[in-house]
Amino acid sequence: MGDVVRKLHLVPNDGGGAGRVRRANLAQILKAAEQVFAETGFTGATMAEIADKADLPKANLHYYFGTKEELYRAVLANVLEMWLAPISVIHPEADPAKAIADYVYSKMEAARSRPFASKVFANEILHGGAQIEGFLSHDLKSLVEEKAAVLDGWIAEGRMAPLDAKNFFFMIWAMTQHYADFDVQIRLVLGKRQLTRRDFANFTEEVTRAVLRTAGLSPSD
Amino acid sequence: MGDVVRKLHLVPNDGGGAGRVRRANLAQILKAAEQVFAETGFTGATMAEIADKADLPKANLHYYFGTKEELYRAVLANVLEMWLAPISVIHPEADPAKAIADYVYSKMEAARSRPFASKVFANEILHGGAQIEGFLSHDLKSLVEEKAAVLDGWIAEGRMAPLDAKNFFFMIWAMTQHYADFDVQIRLVLGKRQLTRRDFANFTEEVTRAVLRTAGLSPSD
DNA sequence: GTCTATACATAGATAGAC
DNA sequence: GTCTATCTATGTATAGAC
């Protein structure tokens, strides 16, 4: 953790780590900003609305983050950390079925518990990803290459069915993030007011089964 | 075609269908608007940029569509038509494997050939879908119920593996639209400048295999 | 039916008192 | 370090000449 943040130069001026108030305010602002950016996008979001949600005067946001864009980049940095973390369960020594099921579970849990983070990420990519080009073309690219090599190894050893490993990750991302990003569509089509933990447990089961079958694997427990 | 448009009251004043110039201008504006809304979202898009891309003065857009929101709704109406059309291949008399493969193919082809349309739709849902709530909660909901019943029938007859039929559609939508909506991520991770027809053919093959395996089916040809 | 010039509203950013 | 008042830019929409 922290690596991506530093690499992308996305850290707000921390002043040296002195104040407690500072930390609390930063956290409050970042949380409010994540929600507002998720709901209305970068241009749609207004500093006034974020300030309202953070329960702070508008000028304070500019005091801490300077510009709207800086604030946005700080939110993105948080989001990217969350996005990357789960993939570590994919490593050569792991059991394929268990590792892949764990990965799907983690991504679904992230979609359920931090839907705003997922939407901020989706929105950024949807509109060209100008702020995270470096992250995508370097950090994520090499990570995917590394993890795809793990899958290729398993395939070569006959421990899972042959498939395009990179594309396999794309399909997993597509399905898991869909439940966060397109929740409105899912709710309205199912006629539900809210997607519950039970709903997500069911989705997770279905997605896990789909992914494992695609890889020619059976659940390990 | 036209049904959804009418139901949602999304038709711009057609004046009676007189002019040829009118038709050409409307088409030009709608095409430009689809692209700009896709790239920057509703609030991010400006009438000036759309006018530029449509090669018309800004005031003309207001002449034809009144407000930015009306123009946006007209774009959405087009997009929804495209979105719905392919699902008709799912009907009781069809062969399950062939029908599902055809459906995946059509959705992937739509993602490839009309990426802006897919992005406009994704953006609208991502931000709450206020403009298409009626479409989602009535039209799409009943369509999904009808088509899920077809799958449930196939399952009952032992013609495909048991699964949650509605969720099966969600997974298909997630994967197929991903290649349009997240193309930037895919391109940068793969290190490609552009996704070609060949790339899409490969994605389509992988997604089709994943979907058929999930349904316990083998390719029919 | 087309287009230039402009009115009006909103939102990002800052100055300066506290 | 906080906040009110204000500046300035941008973008939607329209008036009115052609």
Image: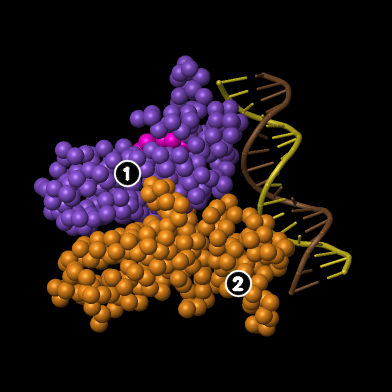
Chain colours: A purple, B orange, C brown, D yellow
Q: Which mark is residue A180?
A: none
Tally the marks: 2
Image height of B43 relative to D2, above or below: below
> Local crowd at mark 1 within 10 Å, few (<14), some, or many (≥20)?
some
The amino acid on which the numbered mark 2 sits, given as a three-letter code, is Ala
Q: Main secondary structure of the magenta part?
A: helix
Residue tagged by mark 2? B27
Question: In the rendered image, is residue B101 in sight?
Answer: yes
Magenta part of the chain: A75-83
User: What is the crowding at mark 2: few (fewer than 14 residues within 10 Å), some, or many (at least 20)?
Assistant: few
Q: Is residue A80 magenta?
A: yes
Whole-percent x and y of residue B84? 41, 71
Amino acid beneath label 1: Val
**Helix or strand or loop: what does disc 2 sit on?**
helix
Q: Position of residue B106 (x, y in %)?
A: 37, 70
Q: CA distance from mark 1 to mark 2?
A: 41 Å
> Mark 2 belongs to which subunit?
B
Q: Is residue A23 magenta?
A: no
Figure check: B181 above or below B12 = above
- Location of residue B22 by image quarter: bottom right
Q: Give the image quarter of residue A211.
A: bottom left
Of the 4 image quadrants, the one containing the N terminus of chain A is top left
Q: Which residue is mark 1?
A: A144
- Name the residue located 51 percent from the left edge and 69 percent from the top edge: B77
Q: Which residue is located at x 14 percent, y 43 percent?
A: A95
Write down the chain letter for disc 1.
A
Q: Position of residue A216 (x, y in %)?
A: 16, 56
